[in-house]
Image (cartoon, grey):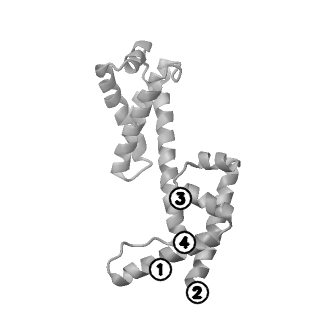
Amino acid sequence: MPRHKQALSCEFSDSYVSGLRNGNPEIQNHFASYFGGAVDFWLRFRLRDHTAIEDLRQETLCRVLEAIKREKSLRDANRLGQFVNGICRNVLFEHWRATQRTTELDECLGSWDEASGPEQSLQTEESLCQLRTAMMSLPEYDRAVLLMLYFDELDRSEVSERLGVKRGHLRVLVHRAISRLRESFISCACK
């Protein structure tokens, strides 16, 4: 049986979880080595960036330990494997959402290379000026949506709460705002 399947199918006792909760170093080291491999294995199938895999593995294990310290978060010690898996999935989804924020805007406007000379620097500066002009030409609501997501880097849940819309509808609002920004940016570039 593969190592990640073993980690998820093994039974754990209440004393093991209690040791994690109380900060027993021996049990925490066992936990990190035991579940670290399973989380690493699971993430490797979903990500290519080794640095991101390492970061997300550590984030997952830290969040599990933090959650276990809140006594009511894990009710059944035998479900520790599924608990770790669920937190790992949430961490991965957060990572994808965070990277999606920056790539959506880059794809919309086209990414700029670092300025390699005066001409490239001037083009980048002109593009930024066009972007500012395009942003200012947007309706206030669209501008607010984009600023909260891409410049303030707020979570989509928080943005939808601030705007008083459902999260599914926020996706539509973001798509429309980006489309309007793209049109405005192109028209500013053509002037």
Compare marks 3 and 2 and give the one earlier in the sequence.
Answer: 3
List x then y, in percent, for residue 78. 48, 19
Of tags 4 and 3, the one toward the viewer is 4
- Tell me the distance, in whole angstroms, between the alpha carbons under discs 4 and 2: 14 Å
Picture coordinates of residue 106 (x, y %)? 49, 66
Labelled disc at residue 150: 3
Residue kind at label 1, given as amino acid type: Glu
Mark 1–mark 2 Cα distance, whole angstroms, equals 12 Å
Residue 177, visible in the rendered structure: yes
- Residue depicted at x 58% and y 86%: 191
Q: Which residue is mark 1?
A: 126
Q: Quadrant of residue 65?
A: top left
Secondary element under disc 4, as helix, strand or loop, is helix
* Amino acid under disc 4: Arg
Q: Residue furthest bottom?
A: 191
N-terminal of the two: label 1 or label 3? 1
Q: Which circle marks residue 17 in the picture?
A: none
Query: Is residue 8 among the parts visible in the rendering?
Result: no
Q: Nearer the viewer, mark 4 or mark 2?
A: 4
Q: Are marks 1 and 3 in contact (CB under 8 Å)?
A: no
Which comes before the other along the chain, label 1 or label 2?
1
**CB atoms at circles 1 and 2 under 8 Å apart?**
no
**Type of amino acid under label 2:** Lys
On the image, numbered disc 4 is attached to which residue? Answer: 132
On the image, the x and y values in percent for residue 186 come to 59, 79
Judged left or right of residue 114, residue 109 is right
Does residue 19 sit above or below 129 in this rendering? above
Q: Which residue is mark 2?
A: 191
Q: Nearer the viewer, residue 125 or 26?
A: 125
